[in-house]
Image (cartoon, rainbow, N blue to C red):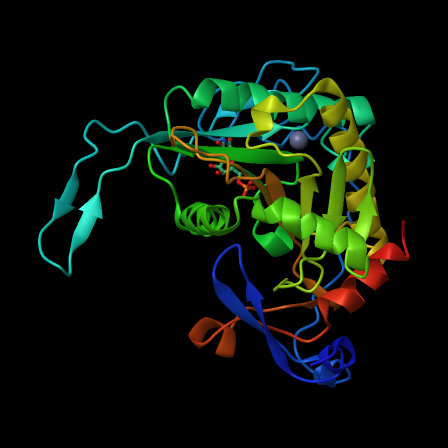
Amino acid sequence: MTIDLFSSQPHRRYNPLTDEWVLVSPQRTKRPWQGKQEEIKKEKRLPFDPTCYMCPGNIRAGGKKNPKYTKTYVFPNDFSPIIDAKSTKIQKESDVFLTEIVRGECKVVCFSPRHDLTMAEMAIEQIEEVVSTWINQMDELKRKYNWAQIFENKGELMGCSNPHPHSQIWASNFIPNEVSKEDAQQKKYYGKNKTIFLLDYVKEEQEKKERVVYENESWIIFVPFWAVWPFETLLLPKKHLTQLTTLSKVDIKQLALIMKKLLTIYDTLFNKSMPYSMGWHFAPFNIKNNSHWQLHAHYYPPLLRSATVKKFMVGYEMLSEPQRDITPEQAASQLRKFI
Ligand code: H2U
Ligand code: ZN
């Protein structure tokens, strides 16, 4: 099958990072849409909101008071989904019922005191500060846990409960599903080829160019060949890095620049502050050999063809496998228009 057929005929693509397939149906891109259109709410936010749980000096939902912070601010999640429990014993009652007690802690990272500034709108130095805060948190959490998921849920469409720009960190003694799959797959590739899968993949994308959105000195962004969400992207360093904690000052600066670039492109695409979930993946903290790992971030925006049409992962996708209409190559070419 040539690439031309890929842009017009239904086909499946393999995701070697997770060992899963995605169904691509480019012939459907002209299908009429009579489903739900999300309402565009004109959001005019103030720099400070006296009713916001995350703004400086305000009382949080749990009753604690935020200091009058002036930079990035981290606080323990008042309703942590994972807490420090005593035992970590796996309980096996039968082949049907298997449970394990989990240990961990969850934190909220407010990007800045400003209630109204998304990361796309923040100054480079402020974004660098967020990255450095993530790194400091990882340095602390890696001593106690095996994994820490840094993620941002942005926008009401993604179920974000508070508009004050923030990310979260959920640290745990266990390695969650998505990270386990990526660990196993990268390990398998390394065992077979003695090279790093994601670095080999970056070279391929740089050669082909059709899915690359943007790159700078240290980082590259592309729509992965196997992307599931319409404008999903992968952001990764061009050199081998297993952890976020080993970024140099230059890497941090370049990262701040490229994240701002990507988020500005996203906001321009549908002329709307783009909702998304994003998060970092890197080698789990306490595995012995982690050289098969390559640090990367996933961005998953849910919008499909306009500011008001959201992609739903339902029906066939829940019951069989993910499906997309617009091809990753078409998505990358649309994103590149706004560089
Ligand atoms: P979102 O990132 O999905 O908006 O979730 C916000 C988190 O902030 C959520 O996990 C926490 C919630 O428990 N939170 C607090 O810890 N304290 C508060 O006062 C409000 C929200
Ligand atoms: Zn706020």
Q: Is residue 57 above or below residue 178?
A: above
**Which of 268/92 is in front?**
92
Q: Can residue 155 be seen in this view?
A: no
Q: In this view, does 63 lie to the left or right of 278?
A: left
Quarter of the image where ligand 2 sits = top right
Residue most toward the front?
193
The quarter of the displayed image where residue 126 is located:
top right
The quarter of the displayed image where residue 30 is located:
bottom right
What residue sits 71% from the left and 84% below the top? 28
Q: Is residue 97 left or right of residue 261?
A: left
**Which of 132/41 is in front?**
132
What residue sits 9% from the left and 52% below the top? 93
Residue 179 in the image: state x and y as whole percent: 45, 45
The quarter of the displayed image where residue 5 is located:
bottom right
What residue sits 71% from the left and 31% below the top? 115
The quadrant in which the N terminus is found is bottom right
Q: Is residue 186 visible?
A: yes
Q: In this view, does 98 lie above or below 50?
A: below
Residue 295 in the image: state x and y as whole percent: 59, 37
Residue 249 in the image: state x and y as whole percent: 73, 19
**Which of 99/9 is in front?**
9
What residue sits 77% from the left and 49% below the top? 273
Residue most toward the left?
93
